[in-house]
Image (cartoon, rainbow, N blue to C red):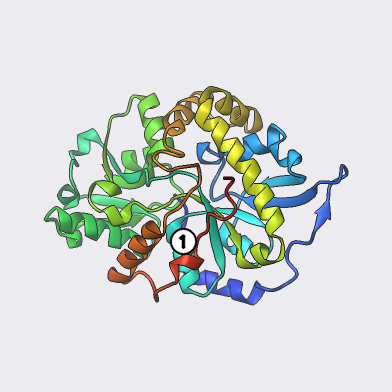
Amino acid sequence: MKKWLGIALVMVLLLAGCSGATEEKSETGEKKVSIVLDWTPNTNHTGLYIARDKGYFKEEGLDVEIILPGEAGADQLVASGKSEFGISAQESLTEARAQDIPIVSIGAIIQHNTSGLASPVEKNIKKPSDFEGKTYGGWGAPVEQAVLTSLMDADGGDFNKVDVVNMGDTDFFTAVQRDIDFAWIYYAWTGVEAELRGDDLNMIYLTDYSDKLDYYTPVISTSEKMIEKDPDTVKAFMKAVSKGYQLAIDNPEEAAEVLIKAEPDLDEELVRKSQEWLATRYQDDAARWGEQKQEIWQNYMDWMLEKKVLEKEIDVKQAFTNEFLPE
């Protein structure tokens, strides 16, 4: 689970406008750019690896480096101009824009929110009110309490009866064996891993209890400055990426092998099964892969304001664009 942007992102304003990434060419003449992941490589990122390793970026005149986030997250690096592109999510990008940090979502990797609260079946957590008396393992973001409260209110529960601990980077399966009862996961990776382990989970999806929690996560981001100064590169990048994700949609078996070859430390069986699970969910009911709707951005911002986890209203029309997606 990606860490919340938080107050530390304000420091990015001190970096914004600095020289940042400079235009470079590869030995064969392609323009060198980078994209920073939000987490360790997984099937959310497959389209990027396909675009790189199948030569789609090269066809567009680009030499793209895929970078792990390290201590500085993708949002920070994109906002400061240290990387041209990043993997973000609607929640963190909305928070960033509320702090006047001008990053923009240019494509939704998955069309609907596939995250939720997961617990081993033996914990007997089948609905949000069952969170009472249980221990939640989180990462310390204000939005977590807001989400849990929303779900529990809708089901007649009381969040004050939940014990919350910070599990940091602890593996979900280790944490539920040790000191927590449930946690927030993305089913495409951790849920699928549970299936392969033979660990039965109860899964409470956020979208089961609120349409406003059906937001875009993850997304591909860039900066307003990048859009203004080099829209052709943004367009070329997204053309190649779209082609990569289309292959993952049409041929998940081939897509999985590309990721496995690129990142051999990944569990091969997990990659293949996760890729199969995601294949129908990348685009889902959208007219094309990556497309975003204003109402989704508006609904989630309204929810954040209502729950007092957003400093101020943002102009959602400035937070995302479909302009760079291929027709």
Give amino acid for label 1.
Answer: Ser
For this view, does 213 lie left or right of residue 244?
left
Residue 130 percent across, percent down from the top left = 16, 47
When the figure is inspected, residue 166 is found, relative to residue 248, above or below; the finding is: below
Residue 180 or residue 45, whichever sits in front = 45
Q: Is residue 287 above or below residue 33?
A: above
Instruction: Provide the residue designation for mark 1.
Output: 92
Asked which quadrant contains residue 70, the reply is: bottom right
Q: Residue furthest front?
A: 327
Image check: 304 left or right of 8? left
53 versus 69 height, above or below: above
Q: Who's the residue at 16% across and 59% down the image?
A: 153
> Is 215 left or right of 223, judged from the image as shown?
left
Q: How many marks?
A: 1
Image location of residue 136, percent across then percent down: 29, 51
Q: Position of residue 27 (x, y in %)?
A: 88, 44
